[in-house]
Amino acid sequence: MVVIGEVGLLTALHSHAEIGLDGQHPDCVIVGMDTDLTYHKIRTATRAIRQGAIFIGTNADLNLPAGAELLPGNGSQCAMIAAASGVQPIFIGKPERIIIDYALAQFGWQRSDAIIVGDNYDTDIRAGFNADVATLLTLTGVTTAADLVGKRQPTRVVNNLDEYVL
């Protein structure tokens, strides 16, 4: 396995002895957010994917809010590797249903017990739509009120979390 990511992802994967890292003949490439992404990491991932490794992305966030600006997110990193390898990633995080189903099962919750809270319509809110879970969009990050025009509406929209009351 080839892993691109930060300490949280690396620690989680290294904690499982059955998962082996193999930069020469990996069976999969896992890409998570990596603020130290290098050409070497991209080249290694691209080569492995071209040789048949499964391409897994942790999430599809194209941008991440950082104060008054938006920074490239993991989806942007995956898009670069997809363009270079010719293979689209299988996303296992937002907005895919698999991550929500897993979380609900871990806590023993029903869909009606949960709400997805987020500031990004394309990942957070779509995750709720895909998993049939209520959604709360906060307008504090990526998505603005203008971005919602003509789109399926979240269950609730607030300017910030102080406005949300159960």
Image (tube, helix red, strand yellow):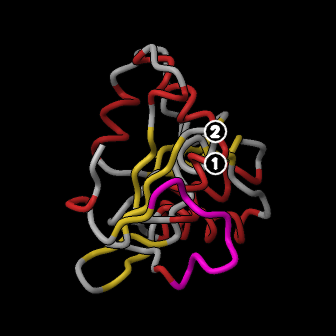
Q: Which residue is drawn at 67% across and 34% down?
A: 27
Amino acid type of the residue that numbered disc 1 sits on in the rendered structure: Phe
**Residue at image mark 2:** 132
**Residue at image mark 1:** 129
- Picture quadrant of residue 87: bottom right
Q: Residue at x 30, y 34 (%)?
A: 11
The span from disc 2 to disc 1 (Cα, nearest Å) is 5 Å
Rate crowding at label 1 as few (under 14), some (14 to 19) or many (20 or more) other CA atoms within 10 Å.
many
Q: In which quarter of the image is the C terminus?
A: top left
Q: Residue at x 54, y 70 (%)?
A: 76
Residue 63: give x, y in percent of width and height: 46, 72
Label 2: state its secondary structure.
loop
Q: Residue at x 63, y 48 (%)?
A: 129
Query: Front-most of 54 and 70?
Result: 70
Q: Is residue 103 above or below residue 153?
A: above
Query: Front-most of 62 and 29?
Result: 62
Q: What stretch is highlighted in magenta?
A: 146-156
Q: Is residue 97 above or below residue 94?
A: above
Q: Is residue 155 magenta?
A: yes
The overriding secondary structure of the stretch rendered in magenta is: loop
Query: Front-most of 103 and 1?
Result: 103
Label 1: state its secondary structure.
helix
Q: Which mark identifies residue 111?
A: none
Residue 131: give x, y in percent of width and height: 63, 38
Badge 2 vs badge 1, beta-carbon distance below 8 Å: yes
Query: Front-most of 106 and 19?
Result: 106
Residue 149: give x, y in percent of width and height: 62, 80
Relative side of 57 to 139, left or right: right
